[in-house]
Image (cartoon, grey):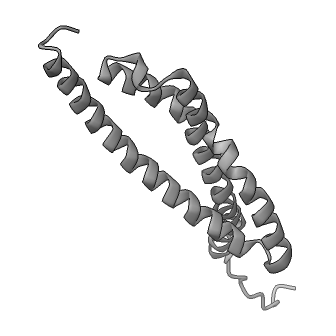
Amino acid sequence: MDKCQYTEVSNNCESANKQNRTEAWKPFLRQLLISSGIWTSMFLYGVSVGAPTVFIPQIRKEANNTDIITDDMASWITSMDCFSGFPFVLILSILTRLIGRKIPFIIAALDTLAAFTEIADSIKGIKSNTGEEASNKLLATNGKV
């Protein structure tokens, strides 16, 4: 038995472990990519619902006048998301049934991007206009408010 010719088996566990570690991340990264679209949509919904509670008092404060945005106007501003989103529920559900989920989701994402761009531009315009209106009212009344 002394004369048995044994060969050493190479230890490739380190390279196998490295490969297993990189492969273990792939399903997680795929799931992260897929779920990030939903997270972004939920975040934007929260921003659009919560934004009026911040910018309505801010506009009133900058204008130094609570009549610049009346309570009726404020209620319409806060409910505008729900009323404008209702037709898209019907349209996108029909499109999803006809052509799949990818194209309606792209349409919704582009529509959301356009809406937020428009809201951001209009808020900048409102802020500059309210400051000018307040200063014009102050000048028109000769400083008597």
Give residue 47's position: percent from left, percent from top.
55, 40
Q: Residue furthest top?
A: 144
Please determine whether, in this image, residue 99 is positioned above or below residue 83: below
Q: Is residue 116 left or right of residue 83?
A: left
Quarter of the picture holding the C terminus:
top left
At 31% from the left and 17% from the top, the residue drawn is 64
Against 65, residue 110 (above or below) is below
Image spot of residue 126 (x, y percent): 34, 38
Residue in the foreground of this view, choosing between 3 and 28: 28
Location of the N terminus (image quadrant): bottom right
* Residue 106 image position (x, y, % from top left): 63, 70
Which residue occupies the foreground of this view, 31 or 110?
A: 110
- The answer to which quarter of the image holds residue 79 is top right
Residue in front for this viewpoint, 101 or 123: 123
- At x 63%, y 57%, the residue is 36
Looking at the image, how many numbered discs can be counted on the residues? 0
Residue at (44, 53) in percent of width and height: 118
Q: Is residue 75 left or right of residue 138?
A: right
